[in-house]
Amino acid sequence: MMVSSKGKYALLVMVDLAQNQGDGHVSLADIAERQGLSMKYLESIVAILNKGDMLQSLRGKNGGYRLARPASDYRMSELLALTEGSLAPVECIKNNDLNCDRAASCMTLPLWVGLDRAIMKYLSTVTLEDVINGDRKKMLGDWCETCEA
Amino acid sequence: MMVSSKGKYALLVMVDLAQNQGDGHVSLADIAERQGLSMKYLESIVAILNKGDMLQSLRGKNGGYRLARPASDYRMSELLALTEGSLAPVECIKNNDLNCDRAASCMTLPLWVGLDRAIMKYLSTVTLEDVINGDRKKMLGDWCETCEA
DNA sequence: TAAATTCCTATCAAAAATATAGGAATTATT
DNA sequence: AATAATTCCTATATTTTTGATAGGAATTTA
């Protein structure tokens, strides 16, 4: 049930871009250095983001990446589903499909579906903008101790 | 973000026991056959459940396993945390501790904490009894189409 | 004593995750 | 035109995790 480094690093890249792109592009070398990550590894992650239309890239000197949209238009559910391949907690409910022959009689399936919905519900309420703003009320909700009721 | 086979099989074992133990014990061979799983692999999973006080075992002929408590006393959060090692979606919030030096300045941490809370909230509302009863209202909530409002 | 079982330890194989390497293609600047 | 900085592409290596198997010791019932 762990988010892979791909997902974690991808989010760090998105946050870094939002904070540093200004009106230009940011190079991977800069991001890697700021975030303390391997640039070569980031390349493979950024490739996924790029193909998933999350970023705009510019090749050549002074090139780099920038967000393809305003930060408020990225839901965490979309970002993580892209980098993790899927957010489904079990194989049987990937692709919005029940690909298991025993699905009809499976006592445990409703639990996994419910868990999937709970995860999706949470992650689709949080946007990249919320993360950048450190919006604790939005991200932590009732569990935020420094938020008013 | 996938639940491992350990977690999935462990739940199948618990469900099988609840449905078949009656007032005796159920052997692993029986469970393995009914569930179509390798008995040898189940041994390693049941060992975890046993050490975690989820089961009572009886060795020797006619031995086997049975639930240590009534089904309503097992929360899915407890079961999965035990078999998966932890339910935390990222390393940094395992053990209810922030074991990362950059935690203080990490923009992404609140998201992971919020996700952790959302998962825990859902899984701690569902019990083994709910699973056995196929309580769709409880497990699927608003997403249950066959439940009344 | 025999049969059926849990329990324990070790090992293996396959898959996935994490990371690195080298170089081709592109672009801005000089 | 040349150079430097960059993305892009493909391949490979390394490490870790997952899933599974094997053999036999200990325990209990009949």
Image (cartoon, coloured by chain):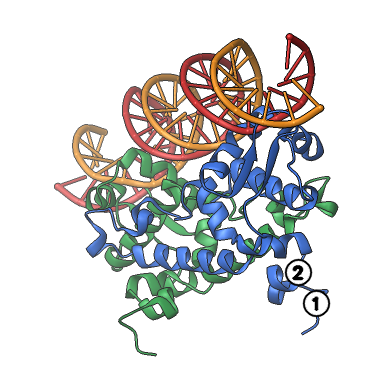
Chain colours: A green, B blue, C red, D orange
Amino acid type assigned to the residue bearing label 2 in the image = Arg
In the picture shown, does residue A32 fall above or below C22?
A: below
Quick check: can you spot residue A13? no
How packed mark 1 is, by other alpha carbons closer than 10 Å (few <14, some 14-19, many 20 or more), is few
Residue A143 visible in the shown view: yes
According to the picture, the residue beneath numbered tag 2 turns out to be B136
Residue at 23%, 64% (x, y): give it: B105
A85 or A104: nearer the viewer: A104
Residue that numbered label 1 is attached to? B147
Secondary structure state at the residue bearing disc 2: helix
Q: Quadrant of residue D12?
A: top left
Give B135 or B106, whichever is nearer the viewer: B135
Seen in the picture, residue A134 relative to B94 is either above or below; the reply is below
Image: A121 above or below A26:
below
Whole-percent x and y of residue A67? Answer: 41, 63
Q: State yes or no: discs 1 and 2 in contact (Cβ < 8 Å).
A: yes
The local secondary structure at tag 1 comes to loop
Which of B45/C12 is in front? B45
Quadrant of the image containing the C terminus of chain A: bottom left
The numbered mark 2 sits on a residue in which chain? B
Check disc 1 and give the amino acid type.
Cys
Q: Is residue B61 left or right of residue A101?
A: left
Q: Name the subunit of mark 1.
A: B
Which residue corresponds to the image point at 59% horizontal and 38% vertical from the top-left? B45
